[in-house]
Image: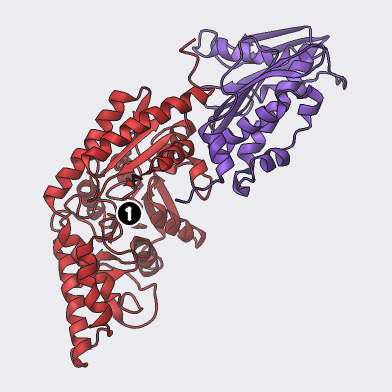
Amino acid sequence: MSFPYNDVVLEHFKNPRNIGSIKDPDGKATEGSPACGDMVSLYLNVDPKTLIISDIKFESYGCASNIATGSIITELAKGQTIDEAKKITWKQASEALGGLPSIKVHCSVLAIETLRAAIQNYEEKNGLVTEKVDTTVEVITKRLKKVMNPIKGLDMIRTNLVKDISVKDGIVDILIDLPENHQFANAIKSDAIEKIETLWDVKEVNVTFTE
Amino acid sequence: MEKNIYLDNAAATRLDEKVLEAMTPSYFDNYSIATSEFGYSMGIDAKDALAEARKTLANRLGAEPEEFIFTSGSTESSNLALKGIALALGQKKGKHIIISKVEDFPVLYSARALEKEGFKIDYIDVDEFGFVNIDKLEKLITKETILVSIQHANQEIGTLQDIEKIGNLCWKKHTVFHTDATHSFTRVPIDVKDIPADLITVSAHTIHGPKGIGGLYIRKGTPIAKIMDGGFQEFNLRGGMDNITGAIGFAKAVDLVTEEENIRIKKMSKRIIELIFEKVPEVTLNGDLESRIPQNANISFHYVEGESITLHLDMYGISVSTGSACFSKSLEASHVIAAIGGDHERAHGSIRFSFGRYNTMEEVEYVVETLASVIKNLRIISPLGKEKEE
């Protein structure tokens, strides 16, 4: 039988390591979307003294490359400090897996991006951000690109769900083009707040709806 | 024991031994070209064998032998139908062609090629089950419309169009009607005495015949130009060496498809749908429950991605295909699922099961059992669909 992936990839695909989620994790991130065909969520617990990743879990909606890369990077990152884990590259993950088909690069890069985003989330929550950039509408927009619009399966910026954003003295106001009683309104709201409130200079996030 | 359960018969089928048996003499004993009736004996025999095969194909469609030409397969047939009509009528009548949004690649990309040459193509919508909107079609046909090409059965979701109604409409409007019947031919009866189609694409590769042979029914009097220049074969509509061996194999394959077999196959596809709905939560049937070809079942499994499903099944010896972008060479999700209003997630999680002569009911049971555990495991991994459980 000839499978499209090597034995190491197949092994991680069949028996992915560190699957699942962590309740109240120290850091977490979700990248990708169902519409793009791949989505990864990653959860971290970090020892506050040593900054070592003590626990890591991931979930994947994706193809074999995506699942296998998610699995291998959790193995690579576990026990590392967050600074070390941040530096894990796609190439390292791919090498650890014995190589991935080039057409599948984007599926596996996503897992690396999710790991970095989860670490960033931890750093922001714990005041560890060293490069302090002022939060602007652009920064908020970039963040909201990571918030899914479940109606469309794509992010809320691309699907024009965000009507208005303003940033003033650490107070962020976001206007969403949905009725307040829409079935997804609350989910989108809490997702958006979560992505924004960790920014170092943000004091308050207000999400309102058009109706 | 390693299992080998092949449920991708819509893509290609295992050759029937009887087909090979019928073809063999034309490889070793009767291998010459088909000569004219004044040629040498081997050539006359070859000519007769080709005529005999043509008769079988034409009969199956209720057509006359001179209305059926052999091609290299459905891709060539549909290219000839679209480009041949465009070439014959583009200058004389108009440059407007209508196809559906769910056509298979030969029709879709022939239309796109013509679009680049200045033809105007309308891509007609389908409803959630895959049926063409006939009222809309009626409004779209104008005096400049030279061709309507709407498939008989869909390659992915199996939906059968009402080609009698569509054909009648085209005829009423004096427009040539082509239908791609690659996935319905012999599995669902088509008789050109009842179905007002001018051109019908058929192929052997879906019915346990050889690959590389297909055909096009061309109703007497249909204005069509040759696109494959060469010799004067196939009533001067297709130059090139006659594939007599293929034609014999195609005819034999047609003869071997019986009504009993179609009923048996229908039972399996019906059963797999029932069993999946029984054993796997959160699934959607793609296509219509009633009006579908007997050999097809297409189901979307929510919250999981198709390539992961097919790879797991492959490791259990099961071959199926998916509409997921990750599975395709182009990395594009199924245009059919998109056309029936499905979101990307539905396309990514869609699996096509297509049955053939060599499948059994035991295989259906095994596949569903395996599938249920594969889906369950992939859903544990997936970040989607968890809200409800919490």
Indicate the chain coloured red by its letter. B
Q: Position of residue B351 (x, y in %)?
A: 38, 38
Query: In the rendered structure, the residue with mark 1 lies on which chain?
Result: B
Which of A24/A80 is in front? A80
User: Circle 1 sits on which residue?
Assistant: B148
Identity of the residue drawn at 86% across and 21% down: A133
Question: Could you tell me the amino acid type at mark 1?
Answer: Val
Which of B378/A40 is in front? B378
Q: Position of residue B143 (x, y in %)?
A: 33, 56
Residue B303 visible in the snapshot: no
Q: Is residue A81 left or right of residue A183?
A: right
Q: Which color scheme did the rendering employ for the protein? A: by chain
Q: Position of residue A41 (x, y in %)?
A: 61, 23
Q: Quadrant of residue B249 in the image? A: bottom left
Identity of the residue drawn at 39% across and 32% down: B300
Secondary structure beneath label 1: strand
Count every numbered label the image shows and give the total: 1
Badge 1 local density, few (<14 within 10 Å), some, or many (20+)? many
Image quarter hosting the N terminus of chain B: top left
**Rendered colour, chain A:** purple
